[in-house]
Structures are given as C-alpha cells and as structure tokens.
Amino acid sequence: MINVGVLGATGAVGQRFVQLLANHPWFNLTTLTASERSAGKTYGSVVNWRLDSPFPESVGELVVSPTTVDAVKDCDIVFSAMPADIATKLESDIADAGVGVCSNASSHRMTEDVPLMIAEVNPEHAALIDVQREKRDGFIVTNPNCSTIMLATALAPLRKFEFTNINVATMQAISGAGFDGVPAFGIYDNVIPYIGGEEEKMAREANKILGTFENGKITGAPFTVSASCNRVPVIDGHTLNVWIDVKASVDEVIDAFKTWEAPFKGLPTQPEKSVLYLDDDNRPQPRLDRNRGNGMTVSVGRVREGIRFVAMGHNTIRGAAGASVLNAELLHTLKYI
Ligand code: NAP
C-alpha cells in the first residue's frame, strides 16, 4: 500500500479528500493535518463534517498533526488542500524532503517544471516530474482551478479541430470559496459578479493544460480565453457557458463530445465517461448532473451555432479532490510513485 496524507483535512476540499481516500484500494490514509487550532486532537472531534455522505469512522481516531514537513515525511504522497499563501513554501519543502505532493492550491500551478494536470486531458505533462527530479527527490503536481478543470476537460474532445478565441461565463457554486468563504447574507437571493483572480487563472491555466510538452517544457496552446466569473447560490457544481471560434459544425462538435474517450481506462477514481454529452435542451444542471460518475464526469450540452455550449461539473470532486486523487492514481501507474 502507498501511505498518503491530507494537508488541510478539515476544509471543504480536505473533507472530500478524506471521503475519497478513507477506503481507497491503493492508498492508505495515515496522516491528516490542519491548523494549530485542530492539531493534537482526533479528526472526529475537530472536523465539522459537512458532506452529504456518512462520516468515515475509520479515520475518526486519527490524531490531526500540525501542517509541517516532519508530520508528513513518512508519507509517499500528500494531497494538499492548503490556503495558497501557506502552500507556496510548505509544498516546496515537502517535495524537497522526498515526498510527492498532489496539490489543489494555486501556488505552483504556473511554475515551469510543475505539471498542471488533468489526468485524462494532458497525462503526458507528468514527464515534467523528471525535470523536477534533477533538483529534488519528491515532486509537486498541481491540478487546475475548479472552473478551469471544467473548461479544459470540455475542450479536450475539440482539440482535433482548430480553435482560437474562447469566451466563457461561469456560474460558480459557493463551496468553491471554502466553507467560510461566502456569507449566507451575501449569496441568498443574489449573484456576485466577481471572484478574485479567477478570470485571470482561467485564461493562463487553460493555455498551459492544453499546451504541448516538448524538450522538457510546455509551450502554451495558441488560443485566448476571455472569462467572466460569477458566484451563484448553488452548493456544489460549476456551470460554464462557452463560446468558441472553432472550425467545425454543430454536428461535428456534438459527435466529438459523444465519441471522445480518455487515453486510459480503469483507474479507481476514473469515471466511465469523463465527458458526457446530454441531449436534453435543459441540461446539464448542477443539482441533477453534478454526481454523475461519482462527481468526476463533466457534463456537456446545448451545442448551438456560434459555437456555443454548456459545461458543468462538481467543483470539489472533479474540480478539486477527485481530480487530484485521479492524478495520483495515474502517477502510480506511470511509476512516479
Ligand atoms: P477551507 O475550507 O478554508 O479549508 C482550509 C484548510 O486549511 C482547513 O483544513 C484549515 O484547518 C487549514 N488551514 C487554514 N489555515 C492554516 C494554517 N495557518 N496552517 C495550517 N493549516 C491551515 O478551504 P478549501 O476550499 O478547502 O480550499 C483549500 C485549497 O484548495 C485552497 O488553496 C483553494 O484555493 C483550493 N481549491 C479549492 C476548491 C474548492 O472548490 N473549494 C477547488 C480547487 C482548489 P482548520 O480547520 O484547522 O482551520
């Protein structure tokens, strides 16, 4: 078994990690960390479990560690759900100490030798780990921001066509801001037309993910993304309206969505369909479609002239913890772990 830890295990993404790892067939969850407020107490006594699945009792008696290099040095991999300001130095120090870090934080996403990976979309970028290993024993692999994951996964089937400009408007769930990120008074009966830093992240991260790996580095993809990001009163599930200048007809785009297959099969967290096209005019919808593929499927629909379409996925599973666990499963099959 591979020993794994979760950094920031009490938060919105951290709880998803615990949910996905508590009974994982390959990974043995040995270490949970959080802030000094929680350290030294059992996980069951400090976590305010807010997921709609039962609390995994098998981890209730694990004692929460402070988030330090020492606390995780016996792990083979750690999954990071840390606030970015803390993750920057901490994740580097952990990787330097020989541990693999699969991170959700934004700190290292654009670092030249760090893969920004969606397992089914750009698995070849894992080779950047070889570049990192010239200077450290461990590694950092990141997954994209939660709205970029939906966009880049939906674009994967369209890569066989030429496209240039992409415009996207997002309707993002409140869980994307963390448990204490959006006060009820701010979001009920409301839409907030600003999410700090999100629009810039969508533009640069999508270029890196769909870029080309050659001679030990990534060359960004040649398209532009203009994003407009909104917070809406949905608990989980980010919905995206996408406009794309693509050299393909409506029928060709629908066919691409329906026939695209991930480049590998059978990993424990991998859904049967990573991209699922829904024919109904009024789908996808977050409440009805976010749990498809155990929360790992990006549902797509409403392809129209323009070309315009809708994409939607579960932000804390496909957009965060699930994507990171799938990355780690892929890295294990590629012998990086
Ligand atoms: P969150 O709910 O606020 O959780 C933060 C976690 O970090 C908690 O476990 C907290 O522990 C711990 N923490 C806070 N301050 C700390 C400190 N000084 N030292 C050590 N641990 C500390 O945040 P989140 O939404 O899970 O997000 C975590 C990371 O994932 C962020 O970088 C975020 O940008 C990224 N992300 C989030 C999403 C999403 O959909 N939510 C998607 C993609 C990426 P205590 O409980 O002890 O305070």
Image: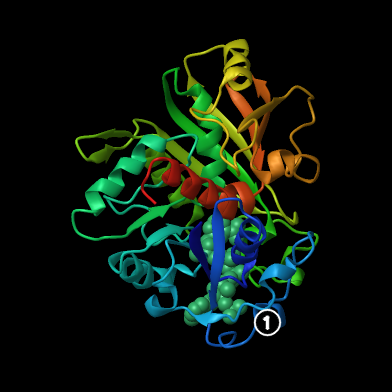
Q: Is residue 172 left or right of residue 278?
A: left
Distance from mark 1 CB to nearest ligand 1 atom below 8 Å? yes
Q: Residue at x 64, y 37 (%)?
A: 271
Query: Mark 1 Cα within 10 Å, few/some/many (few <14, many 20+)?
Result: some
- State the SS at label 1: helix
- Name the image colouring: rainbow
Q: Which residue is mark 1?
A: 46
Query: Mark 1 is on which residue type?
Result: Val
Find residue 34 and report its horizontal and vertical position in percent. Answer: 54, 78
Find residue 210 and report its horizontal and vertical position in percent. Answer: 40, 34
Find residue 276 and report its horizontal and vertical position in percent. Answer: 67, 28
Find residue 74 and report its horizontal and vertical position in percent. Answer: 41, 70
Q: Is residue 305 left or right of residue 141?
A: right
- Is residue 190 visible in this depiction of the protein? yes
Q: Residue at x 64, y 19 (%)?
A: 258
Q: Could you say which quadrant of the image residue 204 lies in? A: top left
Q: Could you say which quadrant of the image residue 28 lies in? A: bottom right
- Is residue 196 visible in this depiction of the protein? no
Instruction: Give the tally of numbered discs.
Output: 1
Quadrant where ligand 1 appears: bottom right
**Of residues 329 and 232, the one drawn nearer to the viewer in this rendering:** 329
Q: Is residue 277 left or right of residue 166?
A: right
**Of residues 153 and 8, the one drawn nearer to the viewer in this rendering:** 8
**Of residues 300 and 22, the one drawn nearer to the viewer in this rendering:** 22
Most extreme residue toward the front is: 1
